[in-house]
Image (cartoon, rainbow, N blue to C red):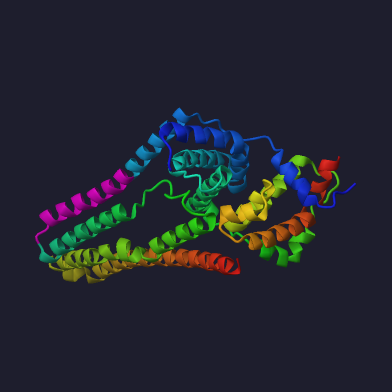
Amino acid sequence: MKNDNPSNGLCNLWQSQSSELIPMPVDELRQASNRLARRVQWRNLREYAAVAVVVAVFSFYGYRFHAMMLRAGASLTIAGALFMAFQLYRKGSAAEMAAGLEAKNCLEFYRMELVRQRDLLATIWKWYLLPFAPGMILFLLGLLLSVMEQPAAHLHYGLIALVFGATFAVCAGVFVLVGAMNHRAAKELQRQIDALDAARIES
Amino acid sequence: MPGSKDQCDCLYQEAISAHGPALGRLARAYEADAEDRRDLLQEIHLALWRSFAGFDARCSLRTWVYRVAHNAAASHILRSRRARSKTLVSLEEIEEQGGIAARDDTGGSVERSQILERLYAFIQCLNPLDRQVILLYLEGMDAASIGDVTGISSGYAATKIHRIKTILTKRFRSGGDHEKR
């Protein structure tokens, strides 16, 4: 015999499932909370360590090379890395768990998270890519000029053009690709925000 | 007013004894991968335990628990690369696509576990808002309570529930039989 409303049967079936509950004693939760905090600290540390490596390497270049353009390029790259580190610190990129989970209803919370991520992705060129561009361009141009000043450079114009052309193209390609991918992801998030807003209006 | 540490621990224990199994089902509905599901469930427990520092009893414990759990799960989905790459649909889109309803799961001998597998697969295709509504519905909440948790109006929640019932009836007719056997 069939139930008139099969969805009621499904509700009963759903609620009668055996639980996958992980028993978590409060002490264990405290430990998990501390572990989480340590993980966030480590991740932050890794990000800052990567910035420190860039700063160390380009400081060495700045010290080792005497050409003005190379030094200016190295200094700008260091400034770009420090700016990025500051932005990472400000935006809290390594936050493991979103804050304010309880403060808002699900619709508000989800929209807020979508907006936060959209803004992060939409502005990535401003705080992640662009700060490196002037330094990298100047540094590569400085390298090119240094190579051109070598006595036998005129014998290898073709090779020099090829190597530097390819390096510029790869750098520019990476920048454009990262920017475009993030722009696309931001657009998809915007689409989801629009759908949520439509639901809110309908609601 | 937010409680002391002990009060928070008590509230957490109370919440888990009343809604723990529902949190397990919620985690499974959000995360298909067993390993990630364990992480998500742990994340939900942690979020819940931490949240009670700010619990002011302006809403019921049940509303609070579901709100925190669904928000933690939605946040998990947004962070998950694999989940982000998946195309999620709304109930309205499913209803419009008559084709999905035509793929009827009415095989008479469908086992209880198979029905649940299909139900989980179906829920995991839904966008977060509709996923929240259907999960709360399956947990036995009415439109007003669903509205409290999700933030949509109770009228809109009722419309969603009606849609859910229609879709579930078409897709899982045998699910209704199960209780009668």
Question: Magenta segment, principal secondary structure?
Answer: helix
In reply to whether residue A58 is colored magenta, the answer given is yes
Indicate the position of residue A158 as horizontal and vertical percent values: 26, 71
Q: Nearer the viewer, residue A100 or A59?
A: A100
Query: Is residue A21 visible from the viewing direction of this image?
Result: no
Q: Looking at the rendering, in which quadrant would you find the N terminus of chain B? A: top left
In the displayed structure, does residue B36 sit left or right of residue B181?
left
Where B4 falls versus A81 (above or below)?
above
In reply to whether residue A110 is colored magenta, the answer given is no
Q: Nearer the viewer, residue B103 or A149?
A: B103
Indicate the position of residue B160 as horizontal and vertical percent values: 67, 60
Q: Which residues are magenta?
A: A44-66
Res A46 → quadrant: top left
Q: Looking at the rendering, in which quadrant would you find the C terminus of chain B? A: top right
Where B36 falls versus A189 (above or below)?
above
Indicate the position of residue A186 as horizontal and vertical percent values: 45, 65
